[in-house]
Amino acid sequence: MINILEVNETNKMIEQEKLDVRTITLGISLLDCCDADLDTLNRNIYEKITGLAKDLVSTGREIELEYGIPIVNKRIAVTPIALVAGRACRSLEDFVEVAKTLDRAARDTGVNFIGGYSAIVSKGMTPNEEALIRSIPAALAATERVCSSVNVGSTKTGINMDAVKLMGEIVRETAEATKEKNSIGCTKLVVLCNAPDDNPFMAGAFHGVSEADAVINVGVSGPGVIKHALEGVRGANFEVLCETVKRTAFKVTRAGQLVAQEASERLGIPFGIVDLSLAPTPSVGDSVAGILEEMGLESVGAPGTTAALALLNDQVKKGGIMASSFVGGLSGAFIPVSEDQGMIDAVNRGALTIEKLEAMTCVCSVGLDMIAIPGDTPASTISGIIADEAAIGMINHKTTAVRLIPVIGKDVGETVEFGGLLGHAPVQSINRFGCADFINRGGRIPAPIHSFKN
């Protein structure tokens, strides 16, 4: 039972502390859309997406009005297109036509983004998967709402270094293809290790093959709520600090569970998972960095930052998991630079470097996210950063990701504006020593010994 005190408390979190449901994401399987004819494939994809998602946005708005909980984004995730389009697509241009179909379906259903222009190449690449990957720069340049992801490794399979090398080149090409818009295509492209099948957050969302025909996944947020709670326990010991985060995460997640159940019932689509992530925005007061600084850090990036983030991530999961019947996705704390004003401020004051961010990714829920780097960064260096992050994920049994934006024409110290939830970012310096000979070896890095559990 929910009493009036809990109702008032939730209203306060919404009105004063920026509590929101960051996204309702409708996952859709496109496996039954496969066809050898490109026109038929595109028609099947468009009709299935628009048929299932026609009421997604309006239902989200109804729930917002009825319960007073802001739902920031309504999104769609589909089966990795490399698995769907292989029979019909005989050229890179054919794959781009499928991307345009996804974009049209997203526009016509009114969603913010559609994810799933993706390939899973953890152990090797088929010709179809390689073709889709090589089409990514043109696809993201020709579309507005399509997001792309490539999974290059896992704890069970190791790291596909051929794919890592290729993705460094693709990130560079995507930056060049969208350079007139501050290389914005790279904000919609993420390289993953241990990608989950049920992630509702872009740009890494896709509908895994282990999923049902359609599911509703919800991603909750609420960095401002956590920070406000911690303001009331300043100076308290770690036991009190942990308990405060845990209790607050429970309340935040419960709102997400309510929205997920309502959306599922009204749309007639099964409920999948709630992702317990703290997803920041560029708005003041909605920052994961602000939480870490409230714990006692002078600035994010100071000694103790990784420990503070580990504490936060763990307590968010412990509190949230009791508030939802099914938890999945990434779940934890996101640390995107451009989308978190506190992170931006820390970079600008010289407290936060890409090396420190990499250390933080060992304990956060994702990885190096929304980081602007100089536009002349070599593809091999980008591949090296991807390899480092994939290794962290592989060894630690966790999802890691890289979303770097080499902004063509920009250098260290300049700022790039992406707009909306993508925010703005200072261009950060990176290690200029080369790794091309390492990246060019080719082949695979084997899975770690502790992955062998069968």
Image (tube, rainbow, N blue to C red):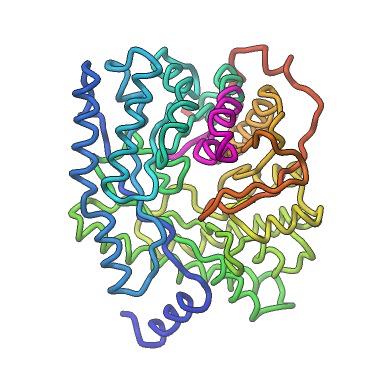
| Residue 221 in view here | yes
> Is residue 397 in view from this perspective?
no
Q: Which residue is depicted at the point 59% across and 23% down?
A: 164
Which quadrant would residue 103 be assigned to in this image? top left
Residue depicted at 66% across the width and 29% down the height: 382
Residue 399: x and y in percent read: 54, 40
Q: In the image as oriented, which residue stretches furthest toward the front?
A: 180
- In the figure, residue 225 lies in which quadrant? bottom right
Q: Quadrant of the N terminus?
A: bottom left
Whether residue 288 sits left or right of residue 64 in the image: it is right
Image quadrant assignment for residue 374: top right
Q: Let me know if residue 167 is in the magenta part.
A: no
Relative to 226, is 307 on the left or the right?
right
Instruction: Give the magenta part as a residue range.
Output: 169-197
Whether 165 is drawn above or below 242: the answer is above
Q: Nearer the viewer, residue 109 or 439?
A: 109
* 187 falls in the magenta region: yes
Would residue 165 appear left or right of 68 to someone viewing this image?
Answer: right
